[in-house]
Image (spheres, grey):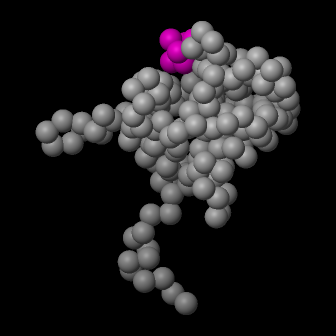
């Protein structure tokens, strides 16, 4: 069976999902991957047939060894990459982790070197720029209780304003 012209034009993006967790001071939980130079948020790629929320829960469980409640969607970001093609990235609200959940964290040491809380002001230095923008917008979306659509980590410009 051959693909039709229409099927060839349909997007088949890679998708990933992650969560923002906070402490009582409003600092963001970041993880240090063993395979990248910069910090990340907990999360990873969505598997075939898996929802973004289910992937987020699975990745948090695999990376951190905990199963906290994952709250609402904060941002969805269309962020294609030259090397990987189209990408759609979801960030969910992990809320404030209670101290017992933090103590229960067991890192996947094959994938992660560290987990630490950092103030929101520090993410620009710790994360790649597009992820830093995404995290700032996710924090703002959480404060407003209003999810946000992004492109490359920023609200797109549309006729008559923006989508934020």
> What residue lies at 38% left-to-right and 77% top-to-bottom?
6
> What residue lies at 18% left-to-right and 35% top-to-bottom?
161
Closer-to-camera residue (37/96): 96
Q: In this picture, which residue range is highlighted in magenta?
A: 119-125
Closer-to-camera residue (39/82): 39
21 lies above or below 19: above
In the picture, residue 102 is in which quadrant? top right
Residue 95 spot, x, y in % from top left: 60, 27
Closer-to-camera residue (84/113): 113
65 relative to 23 in the view: left or right: right
In the rendered view of the protein, which quadrant contains the C terminus? top left
Residue 118 visible in image = no
133 lies above or below 62: above
52 relative to 87 in the view: left or right: right
Magenta part, dominant SS? helix
Residue 57 visible in image = yes
79 relative to 100 in the view: left or right: left
Q: Residue furthest left?
A: 160
* Total numbered badges shown on the rendered structure: 0
Would you say residue 121 sits in the magenta stretch?
yes
> What residue lies at 46% left-to-right and 38% top-to-bottom?
75
């Amino acid at each position: 069976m051959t693909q039709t012209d229409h099927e060839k034009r349909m997007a088949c993006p890679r998708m990933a999902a992650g969560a923002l967790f906070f402490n009582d001071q409003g600092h963001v939980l970041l993880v240090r991957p063993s395979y990248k130079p910069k910090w990340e948020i907990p999360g990873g790629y969505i598997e075939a047939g898996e929802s973004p929320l289910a992937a987020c829960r699975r990745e948090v469980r695999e990376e951190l060894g905990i199963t906290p409640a994952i709250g609402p969607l904060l941002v969805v970001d269309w962020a294609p990459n030259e090397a990987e093609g189209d990408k759609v990235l979801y960030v969910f609200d992990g809320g404030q982790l209670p101290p017992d959940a933090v103590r229960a964290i067991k890192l996947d040491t094959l994938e992660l070197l560290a987990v630490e809380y950092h103030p929101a002001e520090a993410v620009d230095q710790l994360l790649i720029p597009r992820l830093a923008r995404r995290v700032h917008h996710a924090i703002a979306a959480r404060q407003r209780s209003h999810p946000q659509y992004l492109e490359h980590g920023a609200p797109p410009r549309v006729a008559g304003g923006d989508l934020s």
